[in-house]
């Protein structure tokens, strides 16, 4: 009996060891979803599962915009979309397809914009949207680098004599529903102890029409939007945007959460606009950099390295962007400075006292 018991124990031990080896061998080459095992093929597999692959196969980018905001996204008389937000979409299309026209624009309201990203109706939201903690965490968005540093302001008529927020005591203020401006207005006026009457609108056109008709003594929104809308009024010079800034409003492009491969393409396409300006590369002079021996320039333009291929793009993706769309300064000047007259301010490069800063292209 003793001998039998020992043999049984020995056999059980062999079974346990065998099972252990089998389980370990099965798990050796497994990599958790979303993690890179170190194999260079993992990047391409990630890209294949990303929205990036869908966009490439489709052959165009679907971009959610405002469509009613001169300087940022606006449809001209020829039915063409123009503006800073539009040029961001064009830049990404240039990186993807070497063709900035391969974009389908979807005009989205304030209420529609987040759902359109969440549902996959659009690939990207480039629509004067403020980057906030709650939107970044609870709304299912991932924000790319800030493309425009803004702040909430107040527009009034010159004839009103209003010069400060305190002058708005007892007055009516037009504000758009479902925006950060509605909460900011409430917070700032409550903090100052100023009683006012908000007149809330779902549609921005209705809001500015009400302001123009005198139904409210002031209109509040991002200063960029106020400047844009002011330029479209019948007599722009009869209105002013007060110097008072009520809040920080960093505007950024957004994509759906959980897709790092697609997010990388969007993120680095935007950084390319900033880096090109810092390097002094423009749409007009880019050809003169073809023989540059500067390692930073060579990597940026794709003459050496695999920066583009690592993202599933052509190595010259940044060069494509600059060639077709220009750098950030060129985009800003033609859309913001010339259209609505806003100087760059915080939207300068870090080297000129602004906040625009691209991580290294290496």
Image (spheres, rainbow, N blue to C red):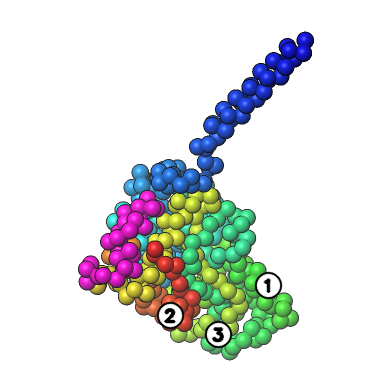
| Residue pictured at 63% horizontal, 55% vertical | 138
Q: Residue furthest top?
A: 1
Question: Eyeballing the image, is 336 above or below 142?
Answer: below
Residue annotated with mark 1: 186
Q: In the rendered structure, which segment of residues is drawn in magenta?
A: 288-317
The percent coordinates of residue 123 (x first, y second) are 45, 52
Question: Eyeballing the image, is 31 above or below 236?
Answer: above
The percent coordinates of residue 103 (x first, y second) are 36, 55
- Residue 351's mark? 2
Residue annotated with mark 3: 243
Q: Quarter holding the C terminus?
A: bottom left
| Residue pictured at 65% horizontal, 69% vertical | 183
Badge 3 marks a residue whose secondary structure is loop
Alpha-carbon distance for marks 2 and 3?
A: 25 Å
Q: Nearer the viewer, residue 210 or 302?
A: 302
Q: Is residue 295 magenta?
A: yes
Pointer 1 local density, CA inside 10 Å: few below 14, some 14–19, many at least 20:
some
Q: Nearer the viewer, residue 160 or 88?
A: 88
Question: Eyeballing the image, is 46 above or below 3?
Answer: below
Q: Tell whether label 2 touches label 1 (CB within 8 Å).
A: no
Residue 206 visible in the snapshot? no
| Residue pictured at 54% horizontal, 88% vertical | 159
Q: Residue furthest right?
A: 1
Mark in front: 2 vs 3: 2
The percent coordinates of residue 161 (x first, y second) are 58, 89
- Residue 316's mark? none
Q: Nearer the viewer, residue 328 or 73?
A: 328
Residue 21 visible in the snapshot? yes
Question: Eyeballing the image, is 141 above or below 292?
Answer: above
Q: Is residue 254 magenta?
A: no
């Amino acid at each position: 009996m003793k001998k039998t018991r020992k043999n049984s124990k020995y056999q059980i031990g062999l079974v346990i060891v065998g099972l252990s080896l089998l389980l370990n061998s099965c798990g050796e080459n497994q990599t958790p979803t979303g993690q890179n095992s170190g194999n260079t093929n993992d990047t391409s597999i990630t890209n294949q599962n990303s929205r990036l692959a869908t966009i490439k196969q489709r052959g165009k980018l679907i971009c959610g915009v405002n469509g009613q905001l001169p300087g940022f996204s606006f449809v001209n008389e020829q039915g063409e979309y123009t503006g800073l937000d539009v040029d961001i979409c064009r830049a990404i299309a240039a990186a993807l397809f070497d063709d900035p026209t391969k974009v389908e624009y979807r005009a989205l309201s304030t209420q529609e914009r987040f759902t359109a990203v969440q549902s996959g109706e659009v690939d990207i939201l480039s629509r004067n949207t403020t980057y906030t903690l709650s939107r970044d965490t609870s709304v299912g968005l991932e924000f790319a680098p800030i493309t425009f540093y803004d702040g909430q302001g107040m527009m009034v008529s010159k004839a009103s004599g209003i010069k400060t927020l305190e002058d708005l005591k007892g007055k009516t203020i037009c504000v758009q529903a479902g925006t950060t401006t509605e909460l900011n207005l409430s917070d700032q006026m409550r903090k100052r102890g100023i009683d006012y009457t908000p007149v809330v609108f779902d549609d921005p056109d209705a809001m500015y029409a009400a302001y123009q008709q005198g139904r409210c003594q002031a209109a509040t929104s991002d200063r960029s939007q106020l400047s844009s809308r002011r330029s479209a009024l019948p007599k722009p010079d009869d209105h002013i945007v007060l110097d008072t800034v009520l809040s920080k409003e960093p505007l950024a492009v957004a994509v759906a959460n959980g897709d790092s491969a697609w997010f990388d393409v969007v993120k680095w396409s935007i950084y390319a606009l900033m880096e090109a300006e810092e390097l002094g590369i423009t749409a007009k002079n880019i050809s003169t950099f073809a023989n540059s021996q500067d390692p930073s320039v060579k990597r940026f333009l794709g003459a050496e390295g695999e920066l583009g291929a690592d993202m599933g793009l052509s190595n010259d993706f940044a060069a494509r962007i600059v060639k077709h769309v220009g750098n950030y300064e060129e985009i800003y000047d033609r859309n913001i400075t010339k259209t609505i007259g806003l100087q760059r301010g915080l939207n300068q490069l870090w080297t000129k006292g602004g906040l625009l800063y691209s991580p290294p292209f290496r």
